[in-house]
Structure formats: C-alpha cells, structure tokens
Amino acid sequence: MALIGNEAARHAFRAAMDSGALHHAWLLTGPEGVGKGAFARLAAHRLLAEALGAPNLPPGLDLPEGDRTTALIAAGAHPDYRELVRLPKDSDKPEGELARSISIAQVRQLQPLFATKPALSSRRVIVIDAVDELERPGASNALLKNLEEPPAGTLFLLVSHAPGKLLPTIRSRCRRLRFDPLADAEVRDVLRGQLPEASSAELEALVRVGAGSPGRALRYAGLDLAAIDSALSAIARDGDPSNARRAALAKSLGVKAQQSRYEAFLDRAPSFIAGFAVERRGAALQSALDAYDMAQALAATARAQSLDAQATVFELAGLVARLGLHQARAMD
C-alpha cells in the first residue's frame, strides 16, 4: 500500500526509526483525508515487521507482497497490534452508522495487553484513528495514563485532524508529525488508482472539490460533480439573467434523493468562486472575494441549521451569477 505525497513526513519518521531512539508516542496532524491514517497503518506494519526480523525488506516503509506481519494484521491475528476506531452503533450492522466517539471501554480493553510483554518481538504498536474522537473525559484520561507511563516496547501512533482540541497533556507527551494537503497532481494520482473507470472530467471535478485531500474527494465519487461544475460555469459565464439555470440546478439538487450531491454542492460552490477569483483583478476580484465570503457563510449555516435545500442552492448559485454580471459590466 504505497503512499503518495507528504514525503517530508515519511522521511522524518524513517529517520527517527533509523536513529534507534524512536519516541514512544507520535501525533500525526494535518487536514482530514491527506493520508495520516494510511501512513499510521503502514508505519505500524513496518515497525512490527522489522522488530520480527523480516528478511529482504525494501527501503523506506513499504513491505513486500506476502509479508507475514501484513497477513497477520489483515486477519486480525497479530497479538502485538491494536487499532482503535469508532465502532458501528449496531454491532449487527457493521456497515451502518458509526458511534460518535471511541469509547472508554475500547481504551480500557488495552490494559490486559499492556500487562504482558509483546508476544512476537520486543515491540507492539497501537494506532488510534482519530484520537480527536476519544470519548471525553474518560477515554482521553485513560489514554493519558498510558502515554505518561508507556508500557515496555509499546509505540502509539495517534491520528489527529484537530490537535488543538486534545488535552494539552496528551499533546505534550507526543512528538508531532505534520501532514500537509497534497498537490493537485498527487490527488489526481490517488484518484486514478482508486477510481480507474472515472472520466477525465469527473476526476478533475473531484480534484477541485478535494482541495488537496484525496479522502475528501473520494467521498464525492460517483456523484457526477462534473455536471455540477458545468452548471456553475454556465451560470458564471452569462449571469443567468432569467434565473432559469439557477432554478433548474436548485430543483435537481433540492430533493431528498440528491442529498449527497447537495452536500457536495455546498462544498463545491465556495471553492468554485475562489477559483474564479484567482483570475480576476480590481473591482472584479473584490466582487469575487465578497461572493466567496458570503458563500462560505451560507454553506456553513445551511448545514448547521438544516436550511431548505432548494432555496440554499438557488441563493448560492445566485452568488455565482453575480460574478458573470460583474464581468459583463466590466467589459462594457
């Protein structure tokens, strides 16, 4: 599972591994969807494989096909690896809605493990994805005790999208490893690997809505974002003086069956305006910046207050229409 992007973070962790003095707790920070969780799992696999003395390992963090450690973890049978994530609310529906947090019970289930030495080698690894989602205060405090008095041979890899929300005492026990948004070309490479049948237009629309986050882009796969972009481009081009295009877009996205595409539109409309602003100067630039601020605020309010979807789409598209009107006036 080769990673794309954030080479500096990967090299920094590899250097720490090679130093022989690897810190016991790492806080992997950065925007959601840029590969922190994938890195944590890959690093955990490599750490355990090296501790086990796996032969013929390639440079870096990758593992060869058929590696024993990877097979054990995939089967849920590695005694020295644990991963804490939010569990389904209903245990009978593993694909259903997830719990709001990682519970204190999940953290406490680690304690019997810590009462013994690692089984296969001198090392065990705990991945928590994401540590921001620990139940508070119980689960956070339970984890803190382990970070303050780390069990022998145990290394923690903690994924965090919002480290400022963590207990300061948790942050202070960790070494931070920063992950940044990916370049568009890197996001495109990830998407091509994950969506081999997607059209070029759809890939480009996903790259734009991802804004450096392949994970975010993949959430909107299959929602025909290219059609949304096409509709917004048409509105921006002529200002939609008859309101027909805005009304058609609002009608198509405002029904309950289109909820996922509506959510995608709330993300896409502000970023579409931002892209429009990049190419403007003077009064046209100021108009685009004002429209962007209003679009951001409206999209946030629509989510927080569950505003009427059709009315919200029409109003956001109206902000896009103003860009076309302003451009037309500037050319007169």
Image: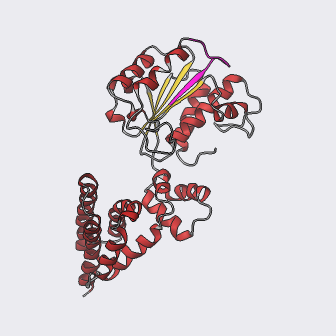
Residue 236 x, y percent position in the rendering: 33, 77
For the point 47% across and 47% down, the residue is 33
Identify the image's colour scheme: rainbow, by chain, secondary structure or one colour: secondary structure
Q: Quadrant of residue 318?
A: bottom left
Quarter residue 136 falls in = top left
- Name the residue at the bottom extreme: 332
Q: From the image, give the main secondary structure of the stretch colored magenta.
A: loop
- Above or below for 60 versus 295: above
For the C terminus, the image quarter is bottom left
Spot the residue most to the right.
56
Q: Is residue 178 above or below residue 260?
A: above
Using the image as rendered, state which of residue 196 and residue 17 is in the foreground: 196
Instruction: Give the side of residue 275 with respect to residue 113, left or right.
Output: left
Residue 264 place in picture, x, y as percent: 39, 61
Q: Residue at x 59, y 22 (%)?
A: 124
The vertical placement of 39 against 246, above or below, is: above
Find residue 122 and report its horizontal and vertical position in percent: 64, 17
Q: Residues in magenta? A: 116-127
Q: Quadrant of residue 189?
A: bottom right
Q: Residue furthest front?
A: 92
Percent across and percent down for residue 262 are 36, 63
Q: Would you say residue 201 sits in the magenta stretch?
A: no
Left or right? Give the position of 83 relative to 259: right
| Most foreground residue, 175 or 152 | 152
Can you say whether 113 is above or below 103 in the image?
above
